[in-house]
Image (cartoon, rainbow, N blue to C red):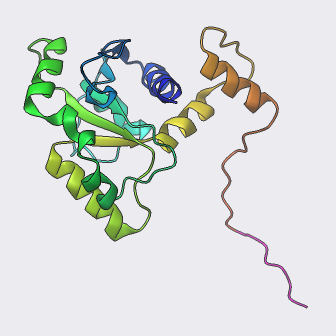
Amino acid sequence: MAAVSETIVREYFELHGFLVRQHRKYIAPTKREDDDIDFFVLNPQAQARTGEQPFVLASGDLPFIQRAIVVVKGWHTETFSSARLASTPEIFRFVEPKVFQQAARAFGKDGTPLKILVVPALPHLAQAREESIALLQSKGVDAVIPFRTMLADLVEHIAVNRNYQKSDLLQMIRILKNYDFFKEPQLELFKSRRKRR
């Protein structure tokens, strides 16, 4: 499942004009897989941000990111609640000074990269969501991107009349879209109510 999750993340950043480099394609026998940085991303056409960067990133925030270290946690059945985060400290290994500084050298001396964590979901309830965000920020994570954001953006940008033969993921989305497996988002302003008998 890790390879599929990483493919989604790579395609998402590439769709938005980033240059993406995988940290390494093998798993070191002396380290756990969770220790690794998954991607280095560089935006060659980054724009200057006028306001403050949000913690939960949306696709519209990507043009303002110049460089980042990205860690993917594709636990798609999990919600990253504060309890889950507290009980899984290995999530934060990539923000430890030794690991981060070693990874940041990949960008040279042009500036400090952001530390982005790709998560399956944050809690829906406001208080639980704020607790999770506060914990992530206290550990040194600069931003998170939910998988839902990435997948929705990929589905929206894939054109049915194009052939994406160089990407299995994009080709699969194209085929599913062609056979109407994805519904267009709808606004239900005037939802009809059923009459009671």
Residue drawn where x is 41% and y is 60% of the image: 123
Quarter of the image for residue 170 reads top right
Task: Tell me if residue 193 is in the magenta stretch.
Answer: yes
Task: Tell me if residue 69 is in the magenta stretch.
Answer: no
Q: Position of residue 31 (x, y in %)?
A: 25, 23
Q: Is residue 32 left or right of residue 148?
A: left
Q: Is 168 rendered above or below residue 86?
A: above
163 and 52: which is toward the camera:
163
31 and 58: which is toward the camera:
31
Q: Position of residue 148 (x, y in %)?
A: 51, 44
Query: Is residue 142 in view from this perspective?
Result: no
Quarter of the image for residue 101 reads top left
Q: Position of residue 78 (x, y in %)?
A: 46, 51
Q: Is 72 rendered above or below residue 84?
A: above
Q: Is 73 rendered above or below residue 121?
A: above
- View extreme (front): residue: 30
Residue drawn where x is 8% and y is 14% of the image: 109
54 and 1: which is toward the camera:
1
Which portion, as a residue range, is magenta? 190-197
